[in-house]
Image (cartoon, rainbow, N blue to C red):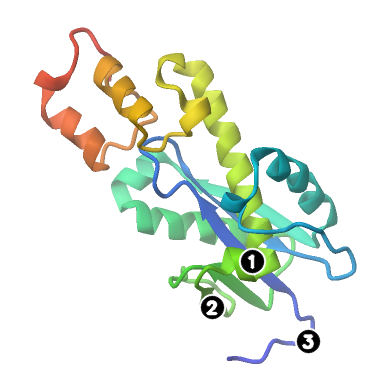
Amino acid sequence: MEAIPATGLICGVDEAGRGPLAGSVVAAAVILDPARPIDGLNDSKKLTERTRERLAPLIRERAIAWAVAEASVEEIDRLNILHATMLAMQRAVAALGCVPDLVRIDGNRCPPLAVPAEGVVQGDAKVPAIAAASILAKTVRDGQMVALDGEYPAYGFASHKGYPTPEHFLALRRHGVVACHRRSFAPVRELLDNPELWPAGTLT
């Protein structure tokens, strides 16, 4: 591994929202401050919503630097979800208030960055900075889905957050595809390619 330069600023990066059928993909980048530790950091999926909501402001308050960025539904459909995720990660790192010496990214793929980067498989459970990033990304994206629930109350976005649950599939069948759906994802594309599956009068 390349030696970490003098400042030793290590940034953790993670994303939320690769699997859903709706909404943007969100990435966060966090440089934690060793002098201001945060108890309870873990993979956001292993934490309750209440715990995530408690930790997110602590991360923002105590981190040396943090940033959250996203790639839109249009970008996901144009680029594919992998490339859109990499783009969101690039944007998050670029938005940090300082330049890290090393970026550790959850998983085995890294976006092109101007600084050294390494993938860490299951990093959100192993590297505190990645865990912190996973919490920020998850809470921001969940907040976006709650807002979309207000726009499209028939779809249940506040509960399933856009993931392909039976509730979401039923809403798609009943009400059709709306602007926040990812048209490149198979279940959504199937509806678009087969209009006979749609109820009469649904909106696109």
Tell me the distance, in whole angstroms, between the alpha carbons under discs 2 and 3: 18 Å
Q: Earlier in the sequence, mark 1 or mark 3?
A: 3
Q: Considering the numbered disc 3 on the image, is that residue within a helix, a strand or a loop?
A: loop
**Residue 30: quarter of image:** bottom right
| Residue 68 visible somewhere in the drawing | no
Residue at which label 3 appears:
6
**Residue 130: quarter of image:** bottom right
From the top left corner, tell me how far across and down residue 11 is, in percent.
67, 69
Q: Earlier in the sequence, mark 2 or mark 3?
A: 3
Which three-letter amino acid code belongs to the residue tagged 1?
A: Gly
- Given this view, does label 2 or label 3 mark the residue nearer the observer? 2
Q: Residues within 10 Å of mark 2 (few under 14, many from 20)?
A: some
- Where's the C terminus, which quadrant? top left
Which three-letter amino acid code belongs to the residue tagged 3?
A: Ala
Which three-letter amino acid code belongs to the residue tagged 2?
A: Glu
From the top left corner, tell me how far across and down residue 121 is, in percent.
50, 72
Residue at which label 2 appears:
118
Front-lying residue, 123 or 114: 123
From the top left corner, tell me how far across and down residue 154 is, in percent.
41, 15
Q: Considering the numbered disc 2 on the image, is that residue within a helix, a strand or a loop?
A: strand
Residue at which label 1 appears:
12
Q: Residue at x 33, y 37 (%)?
A: 182
**Direction from residue 173 to residue 105 in the image, left or right:** right
76 up-or-down from 13: above or below: above
- Where's the N terminus, which quadrant? bottom right
| Residue 86 visible somewhere in the drawing | yes
Q: Residue at x 68, y 58 (%)?
A: 132
186 up-or-down from 197: above or below: below
Tell me the distance, in whole angstroms, between the alpha carbons under discs 1 and 3: 18 Å
